[in-house]
Amino acid sequence: MGVGWGSKEPKYNIVDTGPGGEVLCYCILECWYKDSVSGEVGTVWGIGGDKVASKRAGAMFADDEAFKKAYTDALANAFLRLGTSADVHMGLFEDSKYLMQVREHYDNSRAIQAQITTTEVKPAETK
């Protein structure tokens, strides 16, 4: 998956809640990581889930991406234990200062892109 980390094959459990109910999918994922200093390999586990089928407005609805969502949830859940994305889970990206910086960054990016697309590109001269 990356340098120094990965996962083993995911294991899925399907839970049928009964007639006319929901079908749930749970993913259990064993992940590994390698400490860059000591070289020691550690293991973390994650569990994720999603609804494969659910009732909406009186009709059953199937989600063809439920297994992928459950896997992604399990992967994030496993590496959360190592501090991955801790800043997001601690709410550090919800304050007005951060949002202002993001808006400013994207506004500048859009301005640069607009400059690039409006500038006429001349073909190179040939000799």
Image (tube, grey):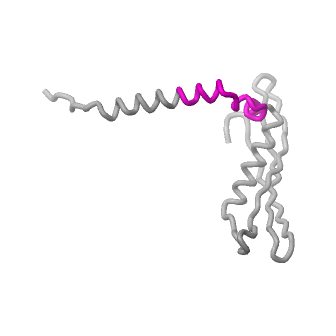
Q: Residue at x 40, y 32 (%)?
A: 113
Say whether residue 126 is left or right of residue 115: left
Asked whether 90 or 37 is in front, the reply is: 90
Q: Residue at x 22, y 31 (%)?
A: 122
Q: Is residue 92 magenta?
A: yes
Q: Is residue 47 magenta?
A: no
Q: Residue 83 appears at what percent x and percent y?
A: 79, 31
Quadrant the N terminus occupies? top right
Image-quadrant location for residue 126: top left
Residue farthest along the bottom direction in this orientation: 19
Asked whether 116 or 125 is in front, the reply is: 116
Q: Residue 112 appears at what percent x and percent y?
A: 41, 28
Quadrant the C terminus occupies? top left
Q: Residue at x 68, y 64 (%)?
A: 63
Q: How many marks?
A: 0
Q: Residue 4 appears at what percent x and percent y?
A: 72, 34
Asked whether 104 or 53 is in front, the reply is: 104
- The residues colored magenta run 84-104
Say whether residue 100 is left or right of residue 77: left
Q: Main secondary structure of the magenta part?
A: helix
Q: Residue at x 67, y 60 (%)?
A: 65
Image-quadrant location for residue 14: bottom right
Q: Quick check: 115 above or below 79?
A: above
Q: Quick check: 44 above or below 10?
A: above
